[in-house]
Image (cartoon, rainbow, N blue to C red):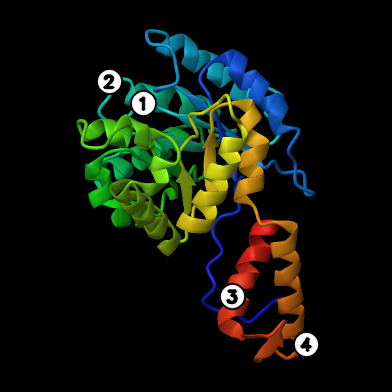
Amino acid sequence: MNPPLDITHIPPRIAPCEHIAGTEKFALKALQIQEQHLRGDGSSLVDITLDLEDGAPLGQEASLRAQFVSILLSDRNKRKRIGIRVHGPTSPHFERDLEEIVSKTASALAYVTIPKVTSVREVAWAAGLITHFTKKLGIDRFIPLHLLIETPEALTSVNDLAAHPAVETLDFGLMDFISHLGGAIPSSAMKSPEQFTHPLLARVKNEIALAALSHNKIPNHNVTVDVRNPSQAHQDAWKARHEFGFLRMWSIHPDQIQHIIRGMTPTADELQEAQEILKAGEAAQWGPIEHKGRLHDRASYRYYWGIVSQAR
């Protein structure tokens, strides 16, 4: 089946769950979990992000970089779906993070996450440094950037950030964003239900998701901080996908992963409906059809082709 849907945008096919690990112990555990959630083609539904920034111990930057380099280059990195979250562009560790990690692991590194981005200029700088370090290795390979939108400054440039060709995802850093507002939004909005119902946060999530999707990039939802109740991660993932358009979500605890995957991917019923409608449309040479009392034409075929593409 190959529908003539010329304006359909299918976002990059990456894992619906991104699990963060800030120590070697947690990273090795995450690699075991990654192997438990595989697609039929052998790729994983879980990406792992090794964290050099907020989730890592202070004062151990050099040793942690060395540990993460070892993990990236090890045989345990079977799927080659490990990324690295470096320090922000204004940090004194930023350039050293990129140099130490990229110049040694460019062939094994899936992506680089840049936190606390505020401008396109910073993105261009990061992309240029990464290109420089990969070329020094003689590797002609594009390593995509994942941008954490954590400040009001970043939000004012969110469309330009999404449009940058080096960018693959826009990630929402909910807690940092709230912290930057100096108490204007209560701490209770760092978790559900207020993270979705507070008017300012709902607007921010809408803007990030729409900017990403408009430029065929992946909007990545913030973490669920309630780690004692893993099913909350499923509720948050479902709401983020169905009501705000996010296609990927961060995990901070292994028990959250299966719930996030379930909430971020089409259900069996959604997939069956999409397949039925597309098969009927194909039989009608992609003209209008009626399915269960509803009219469908190429406008809705585009939607259902997106569902099938996500399910794959």
Q: Of callouts 3 and 1, which one flags the residue occurring earlier in the amino acid sequence?
A: 1
Q: What element carries label 3?
A: helix
Pointer 2 residue: 92
Disc 4 marks which amino acid?
A: Ala
Mark in the foreground, 2 or 4: 4
Q: Which residue is drawn at 25% across and 51% down?
A: 157
Asked if the residue under mark 1 is in contact with the one under mark 3, i.e. CB atoms within 8 Å, the reply is no
Measured in 3D between alpha carbons, the distance from the residue under mark 3 to the one under mark 1, in whole angstroms, is 39 Å
Q: Identify the amino acid type marked 2.
A: Pro
Q: How crowded is mark 3: few (under 14 residues within 10 Å), some or many (20 or more)?
A: some
Residue 33 vertical placement versus 219 (above, below): above
Task: Report x, y in % for residue 38.
Answer: 75, 41
Q: Nearer the viewer, residue 84 or 54?
A: 54
Disc 3 residue type? Arg
Q: For numbered disc 4, what is the local secondary structure?
A: helix
Q: What quarter of the picture does the N terminus occupy?
A: bottom right
Residue 269: x percent and y percent?
73, 62
Q: Which of marks 3 and 4 is nearer the N terminus?
A: 4
Label 3 and label 4: CA atoms lie apart by: 16 Å
Q: Do the residues labelled 2 and 1 touch (CB within 8 Å)?
A: yes
Residue 25 as seen in the image, left or right of residue 54: right
Mark 2 and mark 1: span between their CA atoms?
8 Å
Q: What residue type is labelled 1?
A: His
Whether residue 182 sits left or right of residue 247 in the image: it is left
- Residue ID at (66%, 57%): 266
- Tags 4 and 1 touching, CB below 8 Å: no
Residue 271 placement (x, y as % from top left): 72, 64
* Residue 302, numbered label: 3
Task: Measure the C-alpha gap from mark 2 to mark 4.
Answer: 60 Å
Tell me if 95 is positioned left or right of 280 in this view: left
- Tag 4 residue: 283
Instruction: Sort mark 4 into few (<14), some (14-19) or many (20+) by Cα contacts within 10 Å.
Output: few
